[in-house]
């Protein structure tokens, strides 16, 4: 080992990342989390002083879309994330080793960082027939998860498959797929849902852990409130058309051409919590509704069976009664306080929702 500093800011500098670019990344995250400007700077300072934690990433029943998504993360890039922000000691999809060599790397990472490493999991776990439907190096997903979680500080369930069961759990669920939180009961589990999740949400949770050594405030489904505190509908640029009662009736009628609300074409934005409408995809280029297709509700429990993609929700086509409760956050308030207030604001809004995820099942 060299005597090089393990501080994040020093690692970034060694890899040619300027302080300016780093501050810009922190400002982007702070903005997505609705933190006040001064909190963004405090966030940057805390993150700069962070050391690299060890991360072990297990992939079970999934389509690799989650890894594909984070590898498209614009700031930091996946390379930056691996080499500068975290020490990714095991990731089957990305590492060169396989089989016994990969398992040796997992064991070594666990032993060297016992009690401190973050365990990231994507994909659900097959429980039927002794878990034979998905194995790695002859080890069932269940056994690998339960073995690896023993020395973990916390678990991050990435993607709706890991968070809620997702596509593998869709009827008739031939493998008996279950979510990570159904198996892990003695460690904190953060659910970063979405099929796949938005890259900046994944890196945001890791950045929060790096900066403060804690996991962010979560909603009742275990998701970070900063990103899942409001519905797609609440942040959608087509929302004014919903409020005016202007709806597209087909995908090629006049309303569709004018960009009216897609509610009657089955958009699940009113009952789906995520930041797609503001963070967007592909470096902030667009998101499904901006491309003319309704939200599928992929970040909610019950996706895919409960989607009913082209069936409208059974809720009134009138403006949602959302609490217009202002949350005053003083400019001098610290980041932790800002997060807490953000959580309260989100809960207040949730309390006033007229539709719930249960609508997805109708
Ligand atoms: Fe699932 Fe992810 Fe959808 Fe795919 O790892 S959330 S099927 S994007 O790949 O798990």
Image (cartoon, rainbow, N blue to C red):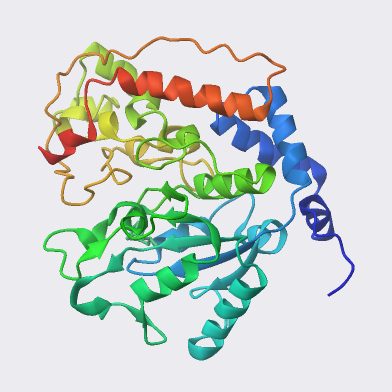
The answer to whether 23 appears left or right of 307 in the picture is right
Residue furthest toward the front? 186
Residue 35 seen in the current view: no
Quadrant, the C terminus = top left
Residue 16, image x, y percentages: 81, 57
Residue 257, image x, y percentages: 26, 29
The answer to whether 101 appears left or right of 280 in the picture is right
Which residue does the image show at 52% across and 62% down from the upper left? 119
Residue 14, image x, y percentages: 84, 60
Total marks shown come to 0
Residue 28, image x, y percentages: 62, 36
The image quarter in which residue 113 lies: bottom right
Quadrant, the N terminus = bottom right
Relative vertical location of residue 106 with respect to residue 206 in this rendering, above or below: below
Which one is nearer the viewer's eye here, 280 or 6? 6
- Ligand 1, seen in the image, is in the quarter at bottom left
Relative vertical location of residue 12 with respect to residue 263 in this rendering, above or below: below
The answer to whether 224 appears left or right of 140 in the picture is right
Which one is nearer the viewer's eye here, 10 or 317? 10
Which residue does the image show at 15% across and 31% down from the upper left? 313
Which residue does the image show at 74% across and 54% down from the upper left? 51
């Amino acid at each position: 080992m060299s005597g090089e500093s393990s501080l994040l800011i020093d690692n970034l500098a060694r890899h040619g990342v300027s302080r300016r670019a780093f501050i810009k990344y922190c400002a982007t995250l702070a903005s997505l989390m609705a933190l006040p400007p001064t909190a963004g700077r405090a966030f940057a300072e805390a993150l700069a002083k962070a050391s690299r934690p060890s991360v072990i990433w297990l992939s079970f029943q999934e389509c690799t879309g989650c890894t594909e998504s984070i590898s498209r993360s614009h700031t930091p890039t996946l390379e930056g994330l691996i080499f500068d922000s975290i020490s990714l000691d095991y990731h089957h999809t990305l590492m060169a080793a396989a089989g016994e060599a990969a398992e040796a790397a997992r064991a070594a990472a666990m032993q060297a960082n016992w009690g401190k490493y973050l365990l990231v999991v994507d994909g659900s776990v097959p429980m039927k027939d002794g878990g034979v439907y998905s194995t790695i190096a002859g080890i069932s997903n269940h056994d690998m998860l339960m073995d690896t979680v023993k020395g973990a500080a916390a678990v991050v369930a990435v993607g709706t498959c890991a968070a809620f069961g997702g596509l593998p759990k869709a009827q008739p669920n031939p493998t008996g797929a279950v979510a990570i939180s159904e198996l892990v009961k003695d460690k904190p589990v953060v659910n970063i849902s979405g099929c796949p999740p938005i890259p900046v949400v994944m890196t945001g949770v890791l950045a929060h852990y790096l900066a403060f050594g804690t996991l962010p405030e979560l909603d009742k489904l275990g998701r970070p409130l900063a990103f899942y505190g409001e519905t797609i509908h609440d942040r959608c640029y087509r929302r004014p058309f919903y409020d005016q009662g202007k709806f597209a009736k087909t995908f090629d009628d006049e309303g569709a051409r004018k960009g009216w609300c897609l509610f009657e074409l089955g958009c699940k934005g009113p009952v789906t919590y995520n930041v797609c409408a503001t963070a967007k995809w592909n470096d902030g280029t667009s998101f499904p509704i901006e491309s003319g297709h309704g939200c599928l509700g992929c970040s909610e429990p019950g996706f895919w069976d409960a989607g009913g993609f082209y069936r409208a929700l059974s809720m009134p086509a009138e403006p949602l009664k959302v609490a217009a409760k202002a949350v005053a956050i003083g400019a001098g308030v610290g980041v932790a306080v800002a997060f807490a207030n953000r959580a309260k604001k989100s809960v207040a809004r949730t309390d006033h929702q007229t539709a719930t995820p249960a609508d997805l099942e109708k």
